[in-house]
Image: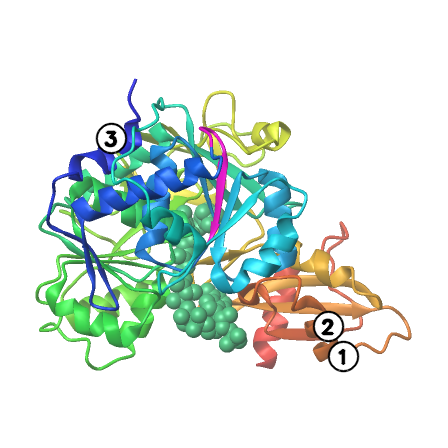
């Protein structure tokens, strides 16, 4: 038996001396050196007690070594679990307790706090630091540069990605080797990514977009990656003339458009601009085409399903649509009430089936059963419409979700935190349009009679409990929440009223 993802993404590069990761420091890691570093990391993980199937939690900066750690996790047969670097200790506690990892890798500056969180869990804490000083990097340095790859089959788990839910706790989406490889192959073929490409990588590497879509396709194709520690407008403008590909969230494109240096000349070497994770406004698509001559290719996906649809590489990339189902991926539009398939041209729930669809939620069989049908179709919670030729447009969401700068924010999680504050009677969290992030978070809060809480006091209470990007930017203290006759809070009314006031 082989290890299908490692064998496809990493093993072929053992003697490939071409550049892989070009870092902000100017250092370039070749593919062959990367393969050797992956092996060193694999030895370090095994020496720390990591066995096949064990979870490796990673909340570390965006470093070449972090990608090597991802590779090492594949090679040792472990399950890679990346976490947003913005998560607070309160959020991390849940993930560590739920995933029961063998190892937690964090930034050196967080070692003490994370060690406390891991106390008594059996997880070993290791560090990675940008200057190469972390305990994991140090351990890896002394290891051999070859490692006997642990065999893994197509259905074995390779990744666990937490996604917040519309109700209750975050759920770990279990990804198999087959899930990731099938999607990487479909995208690499469709977007014709080759070793001649140079990708500007400015996304975080703890989500499907930056890790699986961007890195897995680059590895599969042997492309060069200009690996930026974070989104940096200046750096992207500087790199455009010597690159061919950019993958980003819509905020990347609105920010680029805000700079006069974005010109056709600067983009002359670019082959493809891809957008996803949030709706790309038609006006952004059009403005980008007018300014650069490039039509942004919008695609659609989800953590649980990897990528589902894409506009075509050759053919019409139509603003406001997310294109066609990827090869090997079936999409159906169904009646949200009873799940029956709807004819083309009718709005309904987007459902998806294929090798890309996950294995279920970690330790939550009942949640899995609620969202993943026995037929294999996964209910995305997105509402869409399919044209006669199969082209799909997303028209809304059935799930209560805010997408800010490509990050998903679930109102329920924030409402739970606000409602727990002494003096708060109830709250409703909703999104309003934001020019930079697409959507921004607002909280309407009703206080208990006599409570003297101010917005600042509520914000101070929320701060240590939720990552900064989830924090409501406005706390609107109200006498009562608007409700319909069924007693349901009318968030559209809150949104409209807020919009009229600002
Ligand atoms: C940063 N801040 C944010 C966000 N990002 N607030 C709301 N929403 C955000 N997305 C806040 C910080 O907390 C900070 O707040 C201030 O903005 C500046 O922070 P900074 O780090 O400098 O921000 P930035 O560098 O300008 O980042 C914006 C960004 C980034 C480049 C848009 O958020 C980003 O890289 N987003 C991509 C997310 C992504 O990869 N999503 C894919 C997941 P303060 O100053 O007040 O403290 S979805 C996915 O994978 C699915 C499958 C899919 O389809 O792709
Ligand atoms: P996540 O749960 O982080 O995987 O985010 C997945 C969600 O992001 C999807 O269910 C959609 O609601 C949204 N999404 C991703 N790509 C697009 C897109 N191109 N247009 C609109 N929404 C998108």
User: Gap between marks 3 and 2, in whole Å?
Assistant: 51 Å
Q: Quadrant of the N terminus?
A: top left
Secondary structure found at label 2: helix
Secondary structure found at label 3: helix
Place of residue 356 in the rendered image (x, y in percent of width and height, measured from the top left): 36, 32
- For label 2, the residue is 458
Circle on res. 454: 1
Residue at 69%, 62% in the rendered image: 428
Q: Is residue 103 above or below residue 1?
A: below
Q: Nearer the viewer, mark 3 or mark 1?
A: 3
Q: Nearer the viewer, mark 3 or mark 2?
A: 3
Q: Nearer the viewer, residue 346 or 278?
A: 278
- For label 3, the residue is 7
In the rendered structure, does residue 52 fall within the stretch colored magenta? yes
Secondary structure found at label 1: loop
Residue 288 visible in the displayed image: yes
Q: Dot 2, crowdedness within 10 Å: few (<14), some or many (≥20)?
A: some
Q: Which residues are magenta?
A: 51-59
Q: Is residue 493 left or right of residue 420?
A: left
Residue at 23%, 32% in the rendered image: 8
Circle on res. 81: none
Disc nearer the start of the sequence (3/1): 3
User: Gap between marks 3 and 1, in whole Å?
Assistant: 57 Å
Q: Is mark 3 within 8 Å of ligand 1?
A: no
Place of residue 211 in the rendered image (x, y in percent of width and height, measured from the top left): 35, 48
Residue 159 visible in the displayed image: no
């Amino acid at each position: 038996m082989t290890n299908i993802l490692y064998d496809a993404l990493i093993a072929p590069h053992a003697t490939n001396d071409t550049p892989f990761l070009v870092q902000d420091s100017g250092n370039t890691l070749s593919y062959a050196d990367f393969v050797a570093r992956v092996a060193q990391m694999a030895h370090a993980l095994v020496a720390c007690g990591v066995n096949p199937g064990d979870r490796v939690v990673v909340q570390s900066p965006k470093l070449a070594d972090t990608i090597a750690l991802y590779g090492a996790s594949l090679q040792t047969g472990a399950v890679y679990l990346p976490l947003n670097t913005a998560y607070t200790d309160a959020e991390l506690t849940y993930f560590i307790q739920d995933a029961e990892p063998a190892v937690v890798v964090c930034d050196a500056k967080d070692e003490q706090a994370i060690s406390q969180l891991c106390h008594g869990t059996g997880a070993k804490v290791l560090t990675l630091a940008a200057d190469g000083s972390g305990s994991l990097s140090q351990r890896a340095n002394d290891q051999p540069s070859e490692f006997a790859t642990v065999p893994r089959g197509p259905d074995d788990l390779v990744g666990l990605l937490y996604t917040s839910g519309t109700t209750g706790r975050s759920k770990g989406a279990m990804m198999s080797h087959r899930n990731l490889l099938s999607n990487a192959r479909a995208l690499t073929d469709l977007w014709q990514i080759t070793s001649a490409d140079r990708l500007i990588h400015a996304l975080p590497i703890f989500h499907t977009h930056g890790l699986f879509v961007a890195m897995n396709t680059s590895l599969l194709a042997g492309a060069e990656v200009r690996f930026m520690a974070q989104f940096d407008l200046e750096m992207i403008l500087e790199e455009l003339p010597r690159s061919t590909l950019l993958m980003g969230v819509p905020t990347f494109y609105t920010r680029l458009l805000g700079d006069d240096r974005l010109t056709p000349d600067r983009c002359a070497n670019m082959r493809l601009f891809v957008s996803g994770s949030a709706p790309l406004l038609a006006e952004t698509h059009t403005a980008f085409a007018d300014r650069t001559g490039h039509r942004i290719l919008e695609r659609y996906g989800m953590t649980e399903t990897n990528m589902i649809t894409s506009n075509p590489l050759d053919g019409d990339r139509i603003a406001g649509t997310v294109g066609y189902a990827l090869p090997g991926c079936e999409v159906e539009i169904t009646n949200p009430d009873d799940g029956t398939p709807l004819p083309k041209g009718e709005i309904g729930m987007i459902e998806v089936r294929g090798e890309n669809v996950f294995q279920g939620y970690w330790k939550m069989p009942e949640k899995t059963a609620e969202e993943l049908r026995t037929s294999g179709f996964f209910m995305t919670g997105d509402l869409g419409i399919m044209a006669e030729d199969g082209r799909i447009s997303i028209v809304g969401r059935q799930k209560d979700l805010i997408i800010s700068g490509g990050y998903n924010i679930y109102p329920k999680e924030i409402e739970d935190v606000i409602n727990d504050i002494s003096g708060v009677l109830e709250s409703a969290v909703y999104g309003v349009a934001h020019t930079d992030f697409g959507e921004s978070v607002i909280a309407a809060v009703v206080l208990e009679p006599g409570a003297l809480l101010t917005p600042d006091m509520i914000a101070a209470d929320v701060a240590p409990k939720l990552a900064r990007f989830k924090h409501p930017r406005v706390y609107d203290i109200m006498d009562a929440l608007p409700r319909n006759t069924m007693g349901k809070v009318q968030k559209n009314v809150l949104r409209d009223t807020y919009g009229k006031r600002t």
